[in-house]
Image (tube, rainbow, N blue to C red):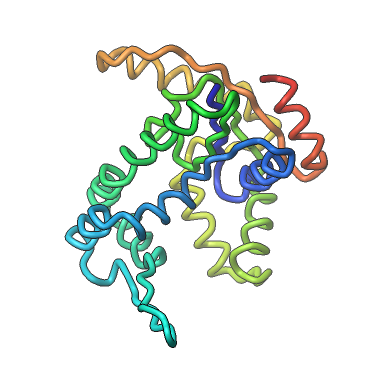
Amino acid sequence: MIIGITGGIGSGKSTIAKELTKRGYQVYDCDREAKRIATEERVVRSSITHLLGEEAYTTIEREGLAPRIVYNTAYVAKRAFADPDILRHLNAIIHPILKHEIRLFNEHYDTLFVESAILFESGLDRMCDKIAIVCAPDNVRIKRTIKRDYNGESTPENISTIKARMNRQTSFRLPAEDAPSLSRLRYKAQSIMRKIAGAVYPITPVIYLNNDGKTPIPELTDSLLEQL
């Protein structure tokens, strides 16, 4: 069984994924694995360099060791978010390998959790038996992101940057208390659009987790497991 875990920036999906890992569950972190694939797979590295140039990677010199090639995530993200075509081509390079690895993992585990911020956009939702959407109010998400990514510096510039990132994640911008009913409607609308386009997929059961900071992560994780 494959369980997708998704949610917008600052929703806390990664925190829940870490709690699942602590409990012994297998979690496939798409963001982390995508960076690994982009760095270690030579064919992928070559394709990304052709798409984005040499700046997509940096080389770290190590005394007594061979130089280490590192994926320049900041540069790649800046280019990809600024150009939808680049993002589409980048996903077309990496996502087929992600999906292949997920299938292989699924053969060895009774329950596999797949964490991805772009679960629906990448089509990974079609591989899932159930999907957990982690929701939280915008102000909570902003506060968490400032603490995590900006050293707690709540400047107007940082807040503006975070809001811009949130605007790109329209599926997850709802306050937690409104998320269940409205997100369900949005998800059904996506399913209808797929049918109109001629691609019919079964509607995957969705679990909503309200991570507004009032319920401890272990309790939220218990709630998720109880609904599987």
The part of the image, by quadrant, that contains residue 41 is bottom left
Instruction: Give the side of residue 135 with respect to residue 30, left or right.
Output: right
Image position of 143 with respect to 220: above or below: below
In the image, farthest residue toward the left: 50
Q: Position of residue 142 (x, y in %)?
A: 63, 55
The part of the image, by quadrant, that contains residue 211 is top right
Q: Position of residue 221 (x, y in %)?
A: 74, 34
> Residue 99 versus residue 63: which sits nearer the camera?
63
Instruction: Give the side of residue 148 with respect to residue 46, left or right.
Output: right
Image point (29%, 13%), residue name:
196
Q: Position of residue 16 (x, y in %)?
A: 68, 41
Tally of numbered tags: 0
In the image, farthest residue toward the bottom: 63
Instruction: Give the side of residue 100 with respect to residue 146, left or right.
Output: left
Image position of 88 with respect to 227: above or below: below
Image point (54%, 31%), residue name:
4
Image position of 62 with respect to 160: above or below: below
Image point (21%, 67%), residue name:
53
Image point (51%, 49%), residue name:
166
> Residue 4 versus residue 185: which sits nearer the camera?
4
Q: Quadrant of the N terminus?
A: top right
Instruction: Give the side of residue 59 with respect to residue 204, left or right.
Output: left
Q: Quadrant of the C terminus?
A: top right
